[in-house]
C-alpha cells in the first residue's frame, strides 16, 4: 500500500474491559488507522489472552460478560484472534510507525487510556506503565462532540424527542451510540460494545466533527483545553470524567 505522507493518519481505538471502573483490565482491543475523511487503511481486533483466558474470575465482572459466548463462537469461526497484550501493543505501535501516526483517538478517551495503562501495569507488575509511546497525542471524540454536536439545535431537538437522550439538567447526552444515531438518522441503531465494531462508529463521530469546521477541543488532558491549565491529579480527572459521562 502506498502511504501518502501528506495526510494525517489517526489511530481510532476502543477497549472492552473487566474488573472495576477505577482499575479496568482490557480483554477486547480494537483499532483502525484512518484519515480525516474517514477512509480506513487498517483494522485490528484482538482478544487479550491474559485477561480473557487466564483471568476467568475477573472476566465474570465484565459489564458485557453476556457477550462471552459470542466471542467464543467468533474464535471457533476464526473471525477473532487471541493474542497477548504485549503482542497487541507491538502490532499497534508497528501500525502507527508505518503510517507515521502520532495521534490516537477514542470516545471517552480517558477511560480507554486508563484501561490500557492499568492493564500494562497489571501484566508487567508496573515494570512498564504506559501503553502509548511518549509524545503521542490523545484525542477524545466525546470532547469534540461536546463542542461541535451538542450545541447544534438539530441535535438538541433530536435528543429532546427521545426518552433517555438527555441528562437530568436537560443537556443532550453524548454517548457514542446516541451521537451515531443522530449522524445516520436512525434511532434503532444499537452499539455493539465490542472493540473494533465500536471503533468503526467512533471514527464516524470523529469525521463528522472535523467536517463541521468548528472550533473544538481535541486533547484529553486539562492542559490541552484553552483557559484550563490547572493540573489535576490523574485519578481525580478520571473519576470526574466517568461521572460526567454517565450523567451524574
Image (tube, rainbow, N blue to C red):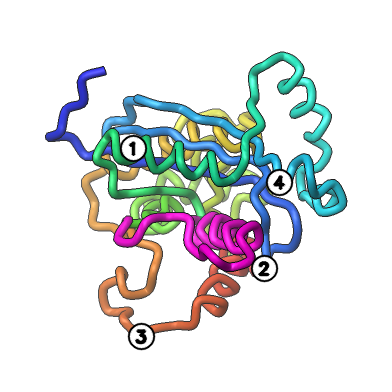
Mark 1, secondary structure of its residue: helix
Crowding at dot 2, Cα within 10 Å, few <14 / some 14-19 / many 20+, comes out as: some
- Percent position (x, y) of residue 26? 64, 49
Q: Residue at x 31, y 70 (%)?
A: 225
Mark 3, secondary structure of its residue: loop
Give the residue at mark 3: 230
Mark 2, secondary structure of its residue: loop
Crowding at dot 1, Cα within 10 Å, few <14 / some 14-19 / many 20+, comes out as: some
Eyeballing the image, is 207 above or below 112? Answer: above
**Mark with earlier residue (4, 2):** 2
Give the residue at mark 4: 50
Spatial separation of the CA atoms under disc 4 and disc 2: 19 Å
Q: Are marks 4 and 2 in contact (CB under 8 Å)?
A: no
Q: Residue at x 35, y 85 (%)?
A: 230
As drawn, the label of residue 36 is: none
Spatial separation of the CA atoms under disc 3 and disc 1: 30 Å
The magenta segment:
109-136
- Percent position (x, y) of residue 12? 42, 41
Q: Residue at x 74, y 52 (%)?
A: 18
Give the residue at mark 1: 207
Of marks 4 and 2, the one in the foreground? 4
Q: Is residue 80 left or right of residue 136?
A: right
Amino acid at each position: 500500500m502506498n502511504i501518502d505522507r501528506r495526510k494525517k493518519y489517526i489511530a481510532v481505538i476502543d477497549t472492552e474491559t473487566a474488573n472495576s471502573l477505577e482499575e479496568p483490565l482490557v480483554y477486547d482491543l480494537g483499532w483502525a488507522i484512518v484519515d480525516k475523511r474517514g477512509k480506513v487503511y487498517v483494522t485490528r481486533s484482538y482478544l487479550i489472552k491474559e485477561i480473557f483466558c487466564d483471568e476467568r474470575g475477573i472476566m465474570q465482572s465484565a459489564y458485557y460478560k453476556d457477550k462471552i459466548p459470542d466471542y467464543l463462537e467468533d474464535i471457533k469461526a476464526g473471525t477473532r484472534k487471541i493474542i497477548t497484550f504485549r503482542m497487541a501493543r507491538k502490532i499497534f505501535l508497528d501500525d502507527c510507525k508505518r503510517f507515521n501516526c502520532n495521534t490516537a483517538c477514542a470516545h471517552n478517551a480517558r477511560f480507554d487510556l486508563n484501561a490500557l495503562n492499568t492493564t500494562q501495569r497489571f501484566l508487567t507488575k508496573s515494570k512498564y506503565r504506559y501503553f502509548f509511546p511518549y509524545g503521542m497525542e490523545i484525542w477524545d471524540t466525546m470532547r469534540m462532540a461536546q463542542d461541535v454536536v451538542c450545541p447544534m439545535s438539530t441535535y438538541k431537538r433530536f435528543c429532546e424527542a427521545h426518552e433517555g437522550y438527555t441528562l437530568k439538567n436537560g443537556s443532550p447526552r453524548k454517548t457514542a451510540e446516541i451521537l451515531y444515531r443522530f449522524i445516520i438518522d436512525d434511532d434503532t441503531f444499537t452499539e455493539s460494545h465490542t472493540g473494533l465494531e465500536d471503533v468503526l462508529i467512533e471514527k464516524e463521530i470523529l469525521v463528522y466533527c472535523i467536517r463541521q469546521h468548528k472550533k473544538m477541543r481535541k486533547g484529553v488532558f486539562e492542559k490541552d483545553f484553552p483557559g484550563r491549565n490547572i493540573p489535576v491529579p490523574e485519578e481525580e480527572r478520571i473519576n470526574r470524567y466517568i461521572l460526567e459521562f454517565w450523567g451524574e
